[in-house]
Amino acid sequence: MSASDHSANPVPISFEFFPPNTPVGDEKLRDVVKQLGALNPEFFSVTYGAGGSTREKTLNTVTAIAAAGFEAAPHLSCVGSTRDGLAEILATYRAQNIHRLVALRGDMPSGTHMAGDFRFAADLVRYVRETQGADWHIEVAAYPEYHPEQRYAARDLNHYVDKVNAGANSAITQFFFNPDAYFHFVAETRKLGALAPVVPGIMPFHNYAKIAQFAQRDGIEIPRWVALKMEGFMDDTASIRAFGIDVVTELCERLIAGGAPGLHFYTMNQAPLTAEICKRLAG
Ligand code: FAD
């Protein structure tokens, strides 16, 4: 099977990494790419530190993935960046034949502020579309439980629609554990005319405490029946792992049955849980 043949998967899958900080991390990621590459992903995406803090590392990771024969999609955030700085990064990607991008606003670390040429992700999408043309595949972020800064759901939905109208091809969601939130988001944004595919972002339970912390920070619901059971396992890592795989696999199955066009896994640069869930989904 070739790298682009994902026929064994019930829907196309993709995997997200963050750029490693050390040579050991690079080495480990090469191995993870090999393991997850065997599952025939459509692409691997690589995150980007807002304000350009991981600029070189994101580029190096993307280059390594492309060199291993896979499609790579760098993330790019616009907060604190200038038009010229972004143009330079886009030119570097174009020179490497990379035409897929996850376009974001990003968040500056708290307490820092850098003036930039763009305020919102929609501005970046418009800029990339205008300067790079139609052959780029632009992904944007979607929030089934709404963006944590946004007080009014309707406004957040409209701002999502702005990104699609600015030229996004498809969206990847923030992680969530409540499939109804996803189905509602898709139905509402379709009613508003945004028909781009919305791919659920899936977070395996790599580390329950950390994920619960992210969820709390970003306003993501962990169902009570999942939270209490996880907490009750205490330090029984085998039970946490087994239950987490069951919960996330069932979530994926419900999403696929309800029409999700693909699945994007937040791998945390680790293969085993994601691989196990994908294998179960492939039956
Ligand atoms: P936007 O779509 O611009 O929205 C941000 C907020 O502004 C929302 O509350 C929205 O409602 C509001 N808004 C939008 N337009 C307007 C307007 N015209 N007027 C008023 N308000 C408006 N962060 C990183 O730093 N690096 C990454 O690599 C990265 N990857 C991510 C990948 C995915 C799939 C997801 C879901 C998130 C990722 N993030 C990343 C996090 C993201 O940068 C943050 O969630 C950030 O706070 C918002 O980015 P956005 O692109 O969704 O912003």
Image (tube, rainbow, N blue to C red):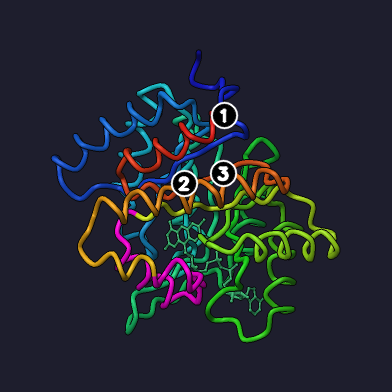
| Marks 3 and 2 in Cβ contact (< 8 Å) | yes
Q: Position of residue 107 (x, y in %)?
A: 43, 71
* Numbered disc 2: secondary structure: strand
Q: Which mark is residue 265?
A: 2
Q: Which structural element holds mark 1? A: loop
Name which residue type carries label 2.
Answer: Phe
Q: Which residues are magenta?
A: 206-228
Q: Which residue is mark 1?
A: 9
* Distance from the alpha carbon under mark 3 to that under mark 1: 10 Å
Q: Indicate the quadrant of ligand 1 in the picture.
A: bottom right
Earlier sequence position, callout 3 versus callout 1: 1
What numbered label is drawn on residue 263? 3
Dot 1 alpha-carbon crowd within 10 angstroms: few under 14, some 14 to 19, many 20 or more: some
Q: Is residue 123 above or below residue 24?
A: below
The answer to which quarter of the image holds residue 244 is: bottom left
Q: Alpha-carbon distance for marks 3 and 2?
A: 6 Å
Q: Circle 3 sits in a helix, a strand or a loop, which is it?
A: strand
* 234 on left or right of 12: left
Residues under labels 2 and 1: Cα distance? 13 Å
Q: Is residue 163 above or below residue 41?
A: below
Residue farthest toward the top in the current orientation of the protein: 1
Query: Is most of the magenta stretch helix, strand or loop?
Result: helix
